[in-house]
Image: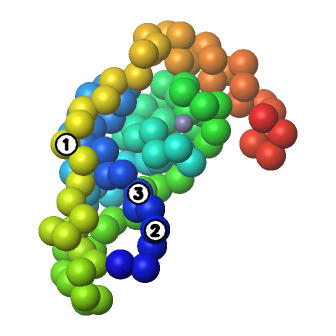
Amino acid sequence: MGCKAMLQLRPNCECCGRDLPPEAADARICSYECTFCAECVETVLHNVCPNCAGGFSSRPIRPVTERRPGVCLAKQPASASRIHMKYSRDEASAFARSVQGIDPAKR
Ligand SMILES: [Zn+2]
Ligand SMILES: [Zn+2]
């Protein structure tokens, strides 16, 4: 495929642990691909990644149909490695509160 590196589709929310399959509409990622569910991003993390202090965007859904040769979910499958953040919810929340007022361009 044309893209040199591809996004890691991680299998779960790194905060609450819920499954986030490739087709999940509520998966959120930071620029380092740290992956969380929309609920944790809103209610615990306040749109601040506990690992890097960056913000989140919706994770794009990787197409299941091979509409271009060699490019689809089956050819570049989702990651199976479950990851959990190394911070407690309280610590992640406190970190978010300390950073959320800073413009993302200046963090
Ligand atoms: Zn979550
Ligand atoms: Zn991050």
Q: Quadrant of the C terminus?
A: top right
Is 45 rendered above or below residue 88?
Answer: below
Residue depicted at x 42% and y 32%: 40
Q: Secondary structure at mark 3?
A: loop
Q: Earlier in the sequence, mark 3 or mark 1?
A: 3
- Dots 3, 2 in contact, CB < 8 A: no
Q: Nearer the viewer, residue 88 or 6?
A: 6
Inspect the image, locate mark 2, and give the three-letter code of the amino acid beneath it.
Lys
Task: Using the numbered discs, state the Cα–Cα distance from disc 2 to disc 1 in whole angstroms.
Answer: 21 Å
- In-image side of 34 versus 73 (left or right): right
Task: Identify residue for label 2.
Answer: 4
Sequence-wise first label, 2 or 1: 2
Circle 1 sits on which residue?
80
Marks 3/2: CA–CA distance: 10 Å
- For residue 95, what is the image quadrant? top right
Q: Which mark is residue 7?
A: 3
- Determine whether 97 is above or below 34 in the image: above
Q: Position of residue 18 (x, y in %)?
A: 24, 34
Does the rendering let one see residue 20?
Answer: no
Mark 3 vs mark 2: give the one in front.
2
Q: Nearer the viewer, residue 32 or 42?
A: 32
Asked if the residue at tag 1 contacts the one at tag 3, i.e. Cβ–Cβ closer than 8 Å, the answer is no
Asked whether mark 3 lies closer than 8 Å to ligand 2, one says no
Residue at image coords 55%, 25% = 50
State which quarter of the image contains the N terminus: bottom left
Relative height, residue 52 to residue 35 (above, below): above
Q: Residue sitting at 33 percent across and 35 percent down? A: 13
Which amino acid, mark 1? Answer: Ala
